[in-house]
Image (cartoon, grey):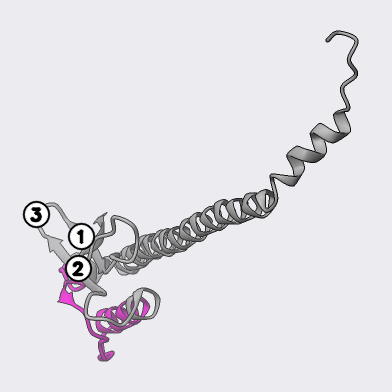
């Protein structure tokens, strides 16, 4: 047996004849694995877009509260009387004849323009006369984000 020569070409050829269609099956499995991976990437991209929009809205809300804080600080004489108080409102306001109503109307326009004109985009300003502080609140709907809330708000306290 040791002296017997083995013809490897015949052995390999016999094995290949029994494996017809195996490479096609391997390709199908590879395409399936690739498609599942691509679907996962598409899902991650969608979640990323929603969370990016949420982060943008939070940034805008911070800027809008700072905007009202600066309006209050720019008018300290009338602000000390509590003139910038605004009950929670979710609608655009018409500008009146005094500076605080003009500032309220402009501020609410900023909220409606940047956070959406839905009934969930609201603004509120309260005043604590004893401590001479204003509290500025901005509310909006953040439910599109993963784990987002429908009643999201940002608060800033302004000391005079």
Give the residue drawn at x 33%, y 66%. 144
Q: Under tag 2, what secondary structure?
A: strand
Tell me the CA gap for discs 2 and 3: 16 Å
Give the residue drawn at x 56%, y 51%. 33
Q: Which residue is mark 1?
A: 135
Point out the stretch of residues depicted in magenta: 81-110
Viewer-side residue, 18 vs 60: 18
Q: Quadrant of the N terminus?
A: top right
The answer to whether residue 36 is left or right of residue 82 is right
Q: Which residue is mark 3?
A: 130
Q: Which residue is mark 2?
A: 125
- Badge 1, how many Cα within 10 Å: few under 14, some, many 20+? some
Q: Under tag 3, what secondary structure?
A: loop
Viewer-side residue, 107 vs 99: 107
Tell me the CA gap for discs 3 and 1: 13 Å
Viewer-side residue, 23 vs 111: 23
* Vertical relation: 110 (above or below) 1: below
Q: Is residue 160 visible?
A: no
Q: Which residue appears farthest toward the left when viewing the image?
A: 130
Q: Are marks 2 and 1 in contact (CB under 8 Å)?
A: yes
């Amino acid at each position: 047996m040791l002296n017997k020569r083995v013809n490897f070409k015949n052995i390999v050829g016999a094995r290949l004849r029994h494996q017809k269609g195996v490479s096609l099956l391997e390709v199908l499995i590879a395409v399936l694995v690739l498609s599942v991976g691509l679907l996962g990437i598409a899902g991650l991209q969608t979640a990323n877009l929603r969370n990016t929009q949420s982060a943008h809205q939070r940034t805008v809300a911070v800027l809008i509260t700072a905007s009202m804080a600066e309006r209050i600080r720019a008018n300290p004489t009338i602000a000390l009387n509590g003139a910038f108080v605004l009950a929670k409102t979710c609608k655009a306001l018409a500008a009146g004849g005094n500076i605080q109503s003009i500032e309220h109307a402009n501020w609410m326009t900023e909220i409606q323009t940047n956070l959406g004109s839905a009934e969930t985009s609201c603004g509120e300003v309260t005043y604590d006369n004893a401590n001479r502080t204003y509290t500025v609140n901005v509310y909006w709907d953040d439910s599109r984000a993963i784990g987002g809330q429908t009643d999201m708000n940002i608060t800033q306290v302004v000391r005079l």
